[in-house]
Amino acid sequence: MKQTFEIFINELVSDEELRTSFLSSPRRTLELAGDWGLPLCDSEIRSLIAAEPSIWDRVAEELDSRLQAAA
């Protein structure tokens, strides 16, 4: 399951459409993740929902700036 959690977080910070969906409807997006083959356990779902929503945009921006600097 840990790998699934890491995959979901990676997708969350790299996919703007997924991030937008998650920020507008986190529980529904996490339910759909199971349908996409990324089932998350209850504690993982709680931790994702409990995180400050702005963290995901900040991480995505930081990652993007680092990737641009590396290129």
Image: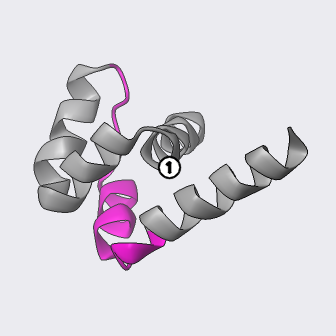
Mark 1: few/some/many CA within 10 Å (<14, 14-19, 20+): many
Q: Quadrant of the C terminus?
A: top right
Identity, as a three-letter code, of the amino acid under mark 1: Val
User: Quadrant of the rendered structure where residue 63 is?
Assistant: bottom right
How was the colour assigned to the protein in this rendering?
one colour
Task: Relative to 56, say whether 63 is above or below.
Answer: above
Q: Is residue 54 visible?
A: yes
> Which residue corresponds to the image point at 12% horizontal and 55% vertical from the top-left?
25
Q: Position of residue 57 (x, y in %)?
A: 44, 64
Q: Is residue 51 visible?
A: no
* Residue in front for this viewpoint, 19 or 41: 19
* Residue in front for this viewpoint, 37 or 15: 15
Would residue 65 be found to the left or right of residue 71 on screen?
A: left
Please tell me whether mark 1 sits on a helix, a strand or a loop. helix
> Which residue corresponds to the image point at 19% horizontal and 56% vertical from the top-left?
26
Q: Which residue is mark 1?
A: 13
Q: Position of residue 34 (x, y in %)?
A: 26, 29
User: Quadrant of the rendered structure where residue 42 is?
Assistant: bottom left
Task: Relative to 29, say whether 46 is above or below.
Answer: below
* Residue in front for this viewpoint, 30 or 39: 30
Magenta-drawn stretch contains 43: yes
Please give the range of residues in magenta: 37-55
Would residue 47 be found to the left or right of residue 70 on screen?
A: left
